């Protein structure tokens, strides 16, 4: 029996003896019927409360989602350190600061455009044939496409061959209104390079990569062309040695390259031509913006001595070219890197600006 019903019965029993005179039979029957009605009403109320409790939804504890459910919902897990290192090393290989792993290959198609303008004074002639001095504006445009193959070798070495093709256009405008345009195109000088990593970064010690390259005079010889023609070749073989140091300091990487180039003597009909030796220096920093993207800022400069003809220096043939280098590298796919670089000339001997786009494709 329910506790509430017991309480009511006890109250009725206690209250009964408190009366002074006994109740008649009719009064007892009426009291019992009244109690039965109260008990029935209480039972109905209890049954209604039980039905309401049964109809209410049960409270369940929701478990924490598993990592697999997060991945199924489209949550991208952050790239691990190995993926970030892979993206950074791809950029350093492109900059010459690292070598490919053994028997890895990269095919590098690239396109480059450069522009250079020089203004000055030049001798001209009036319609009457009288010599005079006039303003002169020289403009040179060069579009170069190349394909390179890079192969990793054992013992931390790497071999590379590059084949260029160039289109050149030179225009000359004088203040007297005369104008001349010269154009040329063809195969450039093929280059073969060999690199070796001598040191690996440890503590204060940087990565150290040395390289030796040979540029063959495969392009059209400018010394044997007609005077007004422009040719894509240099006309001489040149050997270049370089050393590149790389030091990391998260999230940045610092690099520097020192190079020296020596051209072989070209024997022409008018004499022996010897281009001046060249010393190059490049300093820069690389910032890893994300595991897939990096930015590069650097300064590149090259100093070349005078050109000699029959061991006699040609005045004004020495150059000093310096440019500010800006670069963006983006990993488009696990085996594809997009490399975009912009050069802004800082001296008269450097192109006013140069743009290069490369797409190294790695074969595993």
Image (tube, helix red, strand yellow):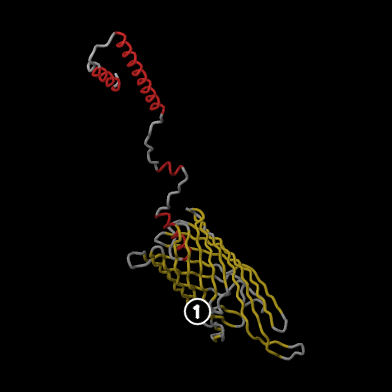
Crowding at dot 1, Cα within 10 Å, few <14 / some 14-19 / many 20+, comes out as: some
The correct choice, above or below, for 299 with respect to 157 in the image is: below
The correct choice, above or below, for 122 with respect to 247 in the image is: below
Picture quarter with the N terminus: top left
Q: Is mark 1 on a helix, strand or loop?
A: strand
Name the image quarter holding residue 348: bottom right
Closer-to-camera residue (270/263): 263
Name the image quarter holding residue 237: bottom right
Q: Is residue 67 left or right of residue 333?
A: left
Residue shown at 34% from the left, 16% from the top:
34
Name the image quarter holding residue 198: bottom left
Name the spot of residue 319 as percent of width and height, x first. Answer: 53, 80
Name the spot of residue 64 as percent of width and height, x first. Answer: 38, 41
Name the spot of residue 328 as percent of width and height, x first. Answer: 51, 63
Q: Residue furthest right?
A: 128
Closer-to-camera residue (328/13): 13
Q: Which residue lies furthest to the front in this view?
A: 20
Closer-to-camera residue (101/66): 66
* Residue beneath disc 1: 303
Name the spot of residue 240 as percent of width and height, x first. Answer: 48, 72
Q: In this view, does 68 lie to the left or right of 272?
A: left
Residue shown at 49% from the left, 54% from the top:
335
């Amino acid at each position: 029996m329910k506790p509430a019903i017991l309480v009511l019965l006890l109250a009725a029993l206690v209250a009964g003896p408190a009366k002074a005179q006994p109740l008649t039979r009719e009064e007892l029957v009426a009291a019992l019927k009244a109690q039965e009605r109260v008990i029935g009403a209480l039972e109905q109320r209890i049954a209604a409360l039980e039905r309401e409790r049964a109809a209410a939804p049960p409270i369940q504890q929701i478990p924490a989602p598993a990592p697999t459910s997060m991945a199924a919902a489209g949550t991208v897990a952050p790239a691990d350190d190995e993926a970030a290192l892979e993206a950074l090393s791809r950029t350093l290989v492109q900059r010459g600061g690292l070598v490919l792993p053994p028997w890895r290959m990269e095919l590098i198609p690239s396109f480059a455009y450069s522009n250079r303008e020089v203004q000055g004074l030049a001798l001209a002639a009036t319609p009457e044939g009288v010599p005079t001095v006039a303003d002169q504006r020289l403009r040179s445009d060069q579009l170069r496409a190349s394909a390179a193959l890079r192969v990793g070798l054992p013992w931390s070495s790497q071999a590379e061959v590059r084949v260029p093709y160039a289109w050149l256009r030179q225009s000359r405008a004088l203040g007297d209104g005369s104008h001349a345009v010269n154009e040329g195109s063809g195969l450039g000088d093929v280059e073969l390079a060999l690199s070796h990593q001598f040191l690996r970064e440890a503590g204060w010690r940087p990565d150290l990569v040395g390289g030796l390259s040979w540029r063959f005079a495969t392009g059209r010889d400018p010394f044997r062309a007609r005077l007004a023609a422009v040719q894509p070749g240099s006309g001489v073989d040149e050997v270049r040695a370089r050393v590149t140091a790389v030091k990391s300091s998260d999230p940045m990487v610092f690099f520097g390259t020192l190079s020296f180039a020596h051209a072989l003597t070209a024997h022409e009909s008018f004499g022996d031509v010897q281009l001046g030796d060249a010393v190059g220096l490049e300093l820069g920093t690389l910032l890893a913006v994300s595991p897939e993207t990096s930015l590069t800022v650097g300064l590149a400069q090259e100093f070349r001595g005078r050109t000699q003809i029959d061991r006699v220096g040609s005045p004004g043939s020495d150059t000093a070219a310096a440019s500010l280098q800006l670069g963006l590298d983006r990993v488009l796919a696990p085996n594809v890197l997009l490399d975009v670089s912009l050069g802004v000339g800082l001296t008269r001997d450097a192109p006013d600006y140069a743009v290069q786009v490369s797409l190294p494709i790695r074969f595993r």
